[in-house]
Image (cartoon, helix red, strand yellow):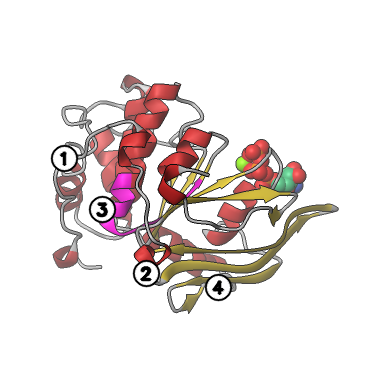
Amino acid sequence: MSAATLPPPPAGTWTSAPTTAIRRPRPASASGPAVLVGRDLHRSFGATTALAGVTLAIGRGEAVAAMGPSGSGKSTLLHCLAGIEPPDRGEVWLGPDRIDHLDERRRTAVRRRRFGFVFQSGHLLPELPAVENVALPLMLEGHPRRRAVAEARRWFAPLGIDGLEHRLPGELSGGQAQRVTIARALVTTPAVVFADEPTAALDRTTGREVVALLVQAARTSGAGLLVVTHDPEVAEACDRSVLLRDGALAAPAAPTPAGRR
Ligand SMILES: Nc1ncnc2c1ncn2[C@@H]1O[C@H](COP(=O)(O)OP(=O)(O)OP(=O)(O)O)[C@@H](O)[C@H]1O
Ligand SMILES: [Mg+2]
């Protein structure tokens, strides 16, 4: 992506309303064709089977929650889908491109260019102001610093963190830091955003606000979203949820009918 084709600014200002305010029924076809498909994914660590044949498709602008007990394979599924580690068996398709069998260098390029990440603790670089943390993925892509920072700045108001651009991560609350992380995940307009327990370090109210913003921001930019979570309220904010047990999908990937499961 050249500097001339930087993504458009996020539209409007999103509210940080509780997750219930943004929940709405969506027909299964609303997401259109899948942007990311994992097919029959297997992954073992020694004698431990982390994934035992998981198939999952995520649509454009669709938010999918992955739930399940500790050790059920949620993070492993995310890592395999996101090209962080290859599955032992199975396939991962990003649109028309198969990405699971790429070498590490190409997988890294896919992660950088096509995916965004939000983890529990944010992983912001402590010595960089918030706006430079958000600009970093663009600079890594070769955009000039000034242009990347200008683009990064545009994400602060929609995420309710304007005025905090020059704070260091250590000067932000947990919820503010997660909003910065969301801006950083979305600044490259990725095809898919992956979030592993993005609210686990936040109090309940802040967690609800942050996940509402995450879902809305991903939807607005057209990105697919996979959220690994233990929190039913987080899952409620998504379009549908899947349940993992012992490395397999225990529940079909049903749409959330009018917010009831
Ligand atoms: N790098 C690794 N080395 C060895 N075993 C691993 C590794 N990563 C995951 N496992 C094992 O694979 C299984 C699934 O782990 P995973 O981290 O995917 O679970 P999870 O559902 O994300 O759990 P949690 O909710 O606690 O984060 C577990 O039994 C775990 O111990
Ligand atoms: Mg995990």
Taking the magenta stretch, the answer to whether it contains residue 54 is: no
Which amino acid type corresponds to the residue marked 4 in the rendered image? Leu
Earlier along the polypeptide chain: callout 3 or callout 2?
A: 2
Q: Position of residue 254 (x, y in %)?
A: 53, 56
Q: Name the residue under label 1.
A: 13
- Dot 2 lies on which element? loop
Earlier along the polypeptide chain: callout 4 or callout 2?
A: 2
Alpha carbon separation for disc pair 4 and 2 = 26 Å
Q: Name the residue under label 2.
A: 32
Q: Where is residue 88 in the image (x, y as percent from the top left)?
A: 71, 66
Q: Mark 3 points at which residue?
A: 220
Q: Do the residues labelled 3 and 1 touch (CB within 8 Å)?
A: no
Alpha carbon separation for disc pair 4 and 3 = 30 Å
Which amino acid type corresponds to the residue marked 2 in the rendered image? Gly
Earlier along the polypeptide chain: callout 1 or callout 4?
A: 1
- Dot 3 lies on which element? helix
User: Residue, x 48% and y 55% (percent of image)?
Assistant: 255
Crowding around mark 3 (Cα neighbors within 10 Å: few <14, some 14 to 19, many 20+) is some
The mark lying in front, picked from 4 and 3, is 3
Give the magenta part as a residue range: 216-227
